[in-house]
Amino acid sequence: MFPKSIFVAILVLALVSMACGVTVDVPVTKFQTGPTQTMTINIPAPSGGSANLTLQFGAGELHLAPGAVNALVDGTATYNVAELKPVITTTGQDVRVSTGNFEIRGIPSIQTKDFQNVWDLKLGSQPMALKVNAGAYQSTMEFGGLALNNLEINDGAAEVNLKFSQPNLVEMKQFTYATGASSVSLNNLANANFAAMTFRGGAGTYTLDFSGGLKRDAGVTIESGISTVTVTVPQGTPATVVFKGGMSSVNAHDGWQKSGNEYTNPGSGPALTITVTMGAGTLELRN
């Protein structure tokens, strides 16, 4: 079943536009469900170094985890809209998996209540730059133990739980996450082994947990609109948070030291420097 909460988020955005007195011609995407089909996906790892993997996912459920053996991607796609059949293209080191000819424009119109689109994919251990582009979806992403040298995620109305339960096996140059009206939880981020991270959100609830083993100094930029942002840094991990907010408030829990618009978590070893810019809402600093 398609997650109702995601449709609610899309409808809220439309209602906000109407409440503001703005006339918006919102297109409607119509599609018809049919028999459920399952497609096996097995993509060999490109030879000759790091792969560039792009997952272009429209709506539904996306589950990613390590575990592909002798492959870059291994898993299944289950769907009951013909246009959702995945399309795989490979050009040298570039691999792309996309949801066929399906594209949501505006508010989706479902002809039945049995919409289904689920990708359950395992990723291989080959070094890769991973890019995920998604629309309205629910997702679990486990990246622990992979070899990601770059990670970029762009989504719309989303419910995402992402974690690095084990260290990333290579140095990640950049981790970028951009989202809309969403609920996003990013966990064990110190294990991602990134040099720089950028998170951009709209109106939503966002949790960034920097637990794990921080191997080197890293810089983090967080930008959000009307939202609740929770940043967790374990005790003993040195971190400085510089806060820039309009109609926003900061709740710093025990362990954080305040000086002007800077909040410090004392410790030793590699350090985090986090800059938070918020339009309105609440920033929670936790240990």
Image (spheres, rainbow, N blue to C red):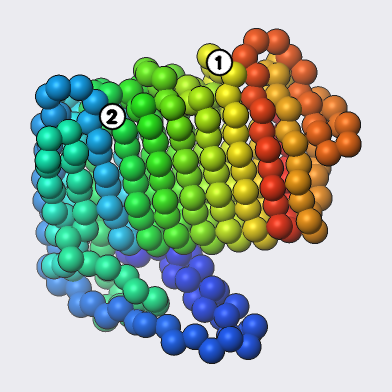
Q: Looking at the rendering, in which quadrant would you find the C terminus?
A: top right
Q: Residues within 10 Å of mark 2 (few under 14, many from 20)?
A: many
**What residue appears at the point 14 percent right and 22 percent down from the top-left corner?**
48
- How far apart in space, not on screen, are marks 2 and 1 (Cα)? 21 Å
What x and y, as percent, mark residue 108?
Answer: 35, 76
Q: Secondary structure at mark 1?
A: loop
**What residue appears at the point 58 percent right and 24 percent down from the top-left corner?**
218
Q: Looking at the rendering, in which quadrant would you find the N terminus?
A: bottom left
What x and y, as percent, mark residue 26?
Answer: 42, 83
Q: Earlier in the sequence, mark 2 or mark 1?
A: 2
Residue hosting label 1: 216
Q: Is residue 101 left or right of residue 160?
A: left
- Which of the numbered marks, if any, corresponds to residue 128? 2
Q: For residue 78, what is the image quadrant?
A: bottom left
Say which amino acid is labelled 2: Met
Q: Secondary structure at mark 2?
A: strand
Does residue 65 appear anywhere in the picture? Answer: yes
Q: Nearer the viewer, residue 270 or 68?
A: 270
Q: For residue 172, what is the image quadrant?
A: top left
**What residue appears at the point 30 percent right and 60 percent down from the top-left corner?**
58
Q: Nearer the viewer, residue 86 or 113?
A: 86
